[in-house]
Amino acid sequence: MSHLEKEKQKLVARIKRIRGQVDSIERSLTSEDDCAAVLMLLANVRGGINSLMAEVLEDHIRYHLLSVERSDALHTN
């Protein structure tokens, strides 16, 4: 995971927004809202999850893979 506290806080805030969106889907389903409204909410959650995944993957690459490559390059020179 991200090693910077600021980054962790940003990821936690993002997951809290996603949780709120999922709760909204549940409310929409139980109140028998229009299918189009439910589909829009689902698309929003999917977008949020995709963004979260991209950010975590980017952090992983930056902090674990690239830093290891830089470290290896320094030790071989």
Image (cartoon, helix red, strand yellow):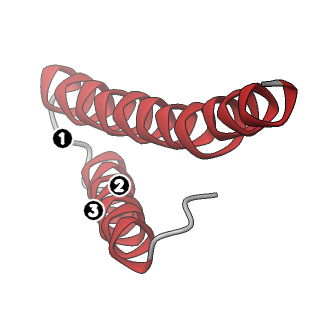
Residue hosting label 2: 18
Residue 41 x %, y %: 23, 36
Going by the numbered disc 3, the residue's amino acid type is Arg
Does residue 54 lie above or below 3 as drawn?
above
- Residue at x 32%, y 48% (from the top left corner): 25
As drawn, is 57 to the left or to the right of 38?
Answer: right
Q: Do the residues bearing badges 2 and 3 touch, measured as CB atoms within 8 Å?
A: yes
Query: SS class of the residue under badge 1?
Result: loop
The quadrant holding residue 55 is: top left
**Along the line of sight, which residue is nearer the eye, 18 or 71?**
71
Residue 39 x %, y %: 26, 23
* Count of numbered labels shown in the rendering: 3
- Residue at x 35%, y 33% (from the top left corner): 51
Going by the numbered disc 1, the residue's amino acid type is Asp
Does residue 70 lie above or below 21 as drawn?
above
- Residue at x 33%, y 74% (from the top left corner): 6
Going by the numbered disc 2, the residue's amino acid type is Ile
Q: Name the mark nearer the viewer: 1 or 3.
A: 3
Residue 68 x %, y %: 75, 37
- In the drawing, what numbered circle is on residue 33? 1
Of the image marks 2 and 1, the number of the one nearer the N terminus: 2
Locate the N terminus and report the quarter of the image it occupies.
Answer: bottom right
Callout 2 environment at 10 Å: few (<14), some (14 to 19), or many (20+)? some
Residue hosting label 3: 17
- In the drawing, what numbered circle is on residue 50? none
Callout 3 environment at 10 Å: few (<14), some (14 to 19), or many (20+)? some
Query: SS class of the residue under badge 3?
Result: helix
